[in-house]
């Protein structure tokens, strides 16, 4: 089979590819593409992307656990960073068909924004139903220019090709951002949603003090993912 090399380099998520696009800001244009095989082969790419995510998470939360990434002389910094590198290396792979990683780069090819998503894999049986936005981060100098908004909208638009819902664990400090995009917190008063909340919160020490669990339907008249999850958990 002949493979179009340019297409292979431009499109990573095989199930729902996103064409390159441009975000115009007062600080200049940001060129947005999906991660490419060339990116992943570059020495130190995963490590640098991990530092980018962690640095920006630390600047967008009140969670003291993240402050270790704002103080590099912290005793646990090196080991914690290695754990995050291992985590992202396990998620960002060419073999993950539904993984989407958007990178927004400036004219110097420096990453100023990134958004990582894939099929939710923490509960068996729902990976093909709900898109999980694992990480979204924008450098402080580019915040306020709707860069995050553009990355999220493109991610969700793409996810509609495969998933019925989108889900994420978002910082409470960013609640306005998610709600303007149409996300709503999971509802503890709904039995199925409470079952999912209780299950997820067992492994999230930052919930509910610092984060909220947000969701949004991508296909209105489809069975909601948390109903499917609740049945799997039970």
Image (cartoon, rainbow, N blue to C red):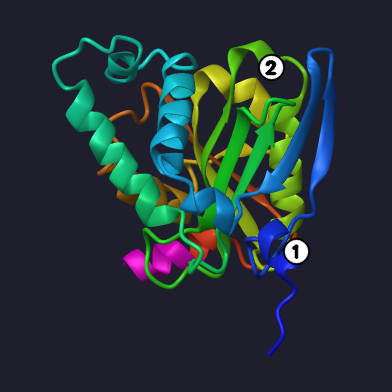
Above or below: residue 136 compared with residue 159: above
Q: Where the N terminus falls, by quadrant?
A: bottom right
Circle 1: element type: helix
Residue 62 quadrant: top left
Above or below: residue 44 compared with residue 179: below
Viewer-closest of 165 and 188 = 165
Q: Is residue 64 left or right of residue 43?
A: left
Where is mark 1, residue-wise?
6
Residue 108 position within the rendered picture, expressed as x and y whole percent measured from the top left: 68, 25
Mark 1 residue crowding within 10 angstroms, few (<14) / some (14–19) / many (20+): few
Question: Which of the two labelled residues, at mark 1 and mark 2, occupies the earlier sequence position?
Answer: 1
Q: Residue at x 77, y 53 (%)?
A: 157
Residue 177 quadrant: top right
* Residue 232 part of the magenta segment: yes
Viewer-closest of 197 and 108 = 108
Where is mark 2, residue-wise?
142
**Residue 130 in view (yes/no):** yes
**Residue 195 in view (yes/no):** no
Q: Residue at x 59, y 19 (%)?
A: 139
Task: Report the span colored magenta.
Answer: 228-234
Residue 222 quadrant: bottom right
Real-space CA distance between mark 1 and mark 2, rounded to the nearest whole angstrom:
29 Å
Residue 21 position within the rendered picture, expressed as x and y whole percent measured from the top left: 82, 43
* Residue 212 part of the magenta segment: no
Mark 2 residue crowding within 10 angstroms, few (<14) / some (14–19) / many (20+): some
Circle 2: element type: helix
Q: Which mark is residue 126?
A: none
Q: Where the C terminus falls, by quadrant?
A: bottom left
Q: Is residue 36 left or right of residue 132?
A: right
């Amino acid at each position: 089979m002949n493979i179009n090399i340019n297409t292979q380099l431009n499109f990573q998520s095989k199930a729902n590819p996103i064409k390159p696009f441009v975000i115009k800001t007062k600080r200049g244009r940001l060129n947005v593409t999906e991660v490419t095989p060339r990116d992943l082969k570059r020495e130190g790419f995963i490590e640098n992307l991990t530092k980018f995510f962690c640095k920006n998470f630390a600047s967008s939360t009140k969670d003291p656990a993240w402050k270790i990434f704002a103080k590099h002389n912290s005793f646990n910094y090196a080991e914690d960073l290695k754990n995050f590198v291992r985590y992202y290396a396990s998620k960002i792979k060419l073999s993950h068909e539904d993984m989407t990683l958007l990178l927004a780069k400036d004219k110097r090819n420096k990453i100023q924004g990134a958004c990582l998503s894939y099929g939710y894999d923490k509960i068996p049986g729902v990976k093909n139903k709900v898109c999980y936005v694992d990480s979204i981060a924008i450098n402080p100098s580019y915040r306020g220019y709707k860069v995050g908004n553009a990355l999220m909208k493109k991610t969700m638009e793409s996810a509609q090709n495969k998933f019925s819902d989108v889900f994420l664990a978002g910082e409470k400090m960013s609640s306005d951002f998610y709600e303007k995009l149409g996300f709503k917190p999971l509802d503890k008063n709904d039995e199925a949603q409470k079952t999912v909340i209780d299950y997820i919160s067992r492994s999230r020490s930052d919930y509910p003090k610092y984060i909220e669990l947000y969701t949004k339907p991508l296909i209105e008249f489809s069975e909601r993912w948390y109903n499917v999850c609740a049945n799997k958990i039970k």
